[in-house]
Amino acid sequence: MIGRVARLVWRVGKPRTIGVRALLLDRDGRVALVRHTYADHWYLPGGGVKKGESIPAALVRELAEEVAIADPVIERVLGVYHSRRESKDDHIVIFVVRTAASGILDRADLREIDQAGWFPLEDLPETTSPATRRRIAEYRRGATGTGAW
């Protein structure tokens, strides 16, 4: 019953959310991707911006929480996208981020992150999500993205 009421409130109120993701590159130019325990695809690391939190602070927090990156250097915004999936009104800000890290990419939150790894931009896992592939393609073209997720 509580779940049905919560879904109804969500549909009626359609709260706007803000998310962040990182196109995180290691010193060898490989991109970090994660597979969540609750999803089948590979994604760019990131998550939601908490109330009272700045967007860059959320990005730094998410990188620490998901892949234990403590030294991210934000280069630029790759794009800002809008998602209406799952009855949401979600805006996602993608940053291009560099790190001096290399080697094995750690999973910081084992309950949320099933796998994490560095991948060459031209050799992504077969199950990389379509939106993640689009963001990486935009980066490789030097484009700034906008529009639908």
Image: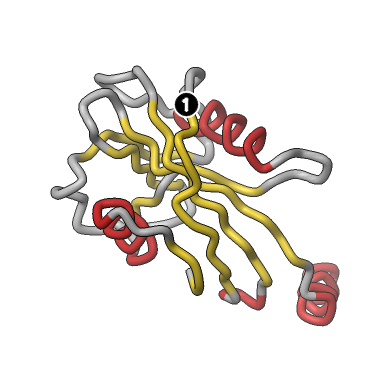
35 is higher (above) or lower (below) than 60: below
Residue positioned most to the left: 123
| Quadrant, the N terminus | bottom right
Residue shown at 20% from the left, 50% from the top: 124
Residue shown at 60% from the left, 76% from the top: 84
Task: Determine the image quadrant of residue 128.
Answer: bottom left
The colour mode here is secondary structure
> What amino acid is found at the position of numbered circle 1 in the picture?
Val
Residue shown at 50% from the left, 74% from the top: 148
Can you give x and y, in whole percent of width and height, for residue 88 in the image?
Answer: 66, 72
Identify the secondary structure beneath mark 1: strand
Task: Tell me: 8 left or right of 55.
Answer: right
Task: Tell me: 86 left or right of 104.
Answer: right
Q: Please tell me which residue lies in front, 117 or 148.
A: 148
Can you give x and y, in whole percent of width and height, for residue 127 in the image?
Answer: 26, 58
Residue, disc 1: 73
Task: Determine the image quadrant of residue 14.
Answer: bottom right
Can you give x and y, in whole percent of width and height, for residue 5 in the image?
Answer: 85, 75
Task: Tell me: 110 left or right of 143.
Answer: right
Residue shown at 38% from the left, 46% from the top: 35
113 is higher (above) or lower (below) than 43: above
